[in-house]
Amino acid sequence: MENVIEIQNVKKSYRKKGAKEKVEAVKGVSLTVKKGEIVGLLGPNGAGKTTLIKMMCGLLIPNEGTILINGINIRQKRLQAMEHISVVLEGNRNLYWRLTVKENLEYFAGNRGHSKKQIQEKMEHLIDRFNLREKENEMVNALSRGMQQKVAVAVALIANTDVIFLDEPTLGLDLETSYEIRTLLKEIVEEEQKTIIISTHDMPVVQEVCERVVIVNHGNIVADDRVENLLQLFESKAYLFTLNATLTKQQISFLETHFVTSISQNDVGQTLLEVNIQQSEDFYRIIDLLAKEQIPIEKIDRTTVDFEEVFMKIVKGGYSHEMAKSV
Amino acid sequence: MKWLNLFKVNIKREVILLKRYLPNTISMILTFYIIFLGMFFGIQVVGDPGSAEMNTQYVIVNYIFWYLSMAVMAGIGWTVQNEVTLGTLEQIYMSPLGAWRIFLARIISSTVVEMITMTIMLFVSMLTAGTWLNIDIIAILPILILMIVSMLGVSFMIAGAAVIFKQIGSFLQISQFIFAGLTFVPLSTAPFLEFAPIVKGVDMVRQIMIFDYSWTDFTVVDYSSLILNAILYFALGIFVFFRCERVAMEKGVLGQH
Ligand SMILES: Nc1ncnc2c1ncn2[C@@H]1O[C@H](COP(=O)(O)OP(=O)(O)OP(=O)(O)O)[C@@H](O)[C@H]1O
Ligand SMILES: [Mg+2]
């Protein structure tokens, strides 16, 4: 498959207002995205996600590095590259509030050179699909935040580009609307062969919509893998033992020096052991140990990690890109 | 064809917003008219009665062109500032046809609207004052078009400044006085202003409207100066605009929030 996005060693620093020092927002990122891939771009606040997205869609010129969109160098042939890209930026700043839903769709499509006739069918389709029919002639400022966000996504889709960037598409939306947007994104992904890059803090979006995750932290990529691989990586190791006993100090310190990561008591006097099991032998060893000490085991659960935890562990735990590659 | 679609939607947008902001537009025109009335009666009361008619004619022509120059040259500054506030500037920059074409389409469509308003105001002013100016379309139109081309250049410079500096409201307020200077000061008192935008054009239109010149009464030098002025300011405007947008994209201030 061909590479739709190819960025190499891209760096960007901003000059702080009034100060002399610079903020290094992106510190040398390389990334390739293939046609049809749905990539989640994750990272804590200030990690550089928006900066990266703005550079990839030609709104921000990097200090260093090259960005190719469908093989077109965005720096040299910006407008030509724009033919292939649309973006929904973070926040509700993508629409004209004094124009109606339809007027916005027509206006932005027109700015890309599409005639009303060319987009008519697609527009009607999107209005139905996004459940906007009742509001099609309402001004955008009269719509809820979630509706506005749907219109913004529709504007990006009507451009009919190969690549779509979505910067935090569910930020600030309630659970229901965020679910609706997620579902729409999933449907779009199934319907059309688009390459989509979604930056988000919303883990369900990652788990349900994205195939691949790129995690950035402090302006660097710290993980880049398929969602299920990252989940597996952490999932296989974590178990939760519920014990019908209170442990002695010796037992606790022994367990802690071995494989146990945390010990706690619940409110009915049971002891909860969180165990990280690296090899299957460890499993026998801990069972043996508990048997020898005659500690009754109530149950053993495999802790299901959700992506949130995986993400936190990667960002906080000094997990590196190289580690991921070696697994 | 693609350009045409771009022009179409921008004209349509202008018309829609004009309708939606109609009370605004009307009150602006009324304000303008009331100020004119003030000036007109001022001339009648304090001015020398012998030159009252000519003074009134001067006021009408100058005032109308002042209005046009503000609307055309500062208008786009307000537009860009508005886009920044709304946050839509970045979406404008996502067009593969280039932001400059979108702004050009906006300026042209608003200029057309302003020309219509201006014509109406011209006739209303003449009726109010009971004086008739020489409206020689054949002579005026080419001059007007060339003047507008140079105004577009200035518009693009202002648009470029707005892309980088965003809040240029106070500058735009001040620019009204600069435009007033350019339209009110006759070329004969300040010949060097021939190199400034629009001054030469307004001067020629004054000759036509007040002193009944026809297009044959101007020399090749007059027309050449006008054409050169238009080309120069337009080219300079586009150049400055491109530089400004590049700087904004490098500094990361394009549509900053
Ligand atoms: N226009 C700007 N001028 C100066 N500094 C900026 C600018 N934009 C971003 N930064 C800084 O660059 C860094 C990266 O910001 P960026 O917006 O890319 O992060 P992000 O990952 O999108 O964060 P968030 O999750 O909060 O949206 C931050 O330290 C931010 O303060
Ligand atoms: Mg961001």
Image (cartoon, rainbow, N blue to C red):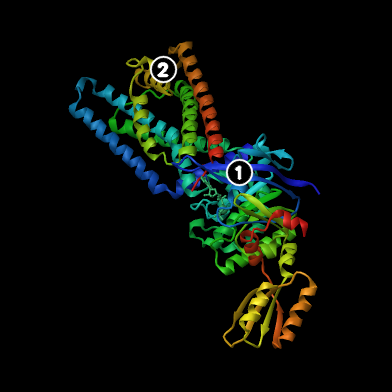
Q: Quadrant of residue B69?
A: top left
The residue tagged 1 is B94
Which residue lies most toward the left here?
Answer: B46
Residue located at (43% from left, 24% from top): B198
Q: Chain of mark 2?
A: B
Residue A61: x and y in percent read: 60, 39
Q: Which one is in front, A149 or A257?
A: A257
> Which residue is situated farthest in the front direction here?
A250
Judge whether B46 appears above or below B106 on screen: above
B152 lies above or below A207: above
Q: Residues within 10 Å of mark 1 (few under 14, many from 20)?
A: many
**CA gap, disc 1 and disc 2:** 39 Å
Label 2 sits on residue: B194
A281 vs A177, left or right, is right
Residue drawn 52% across and 33% down? B244
Sooner in the amino-acid sequence: mark 1 or mark 2: 1
Q: Is residue B88 visible?
A: yes
Frontmost of labels 1 and 2 is 1
Q: Secondary structure at mark 2?
A: helix
Q: Position of residue A94 (x, y in %)?
A: 55, 51
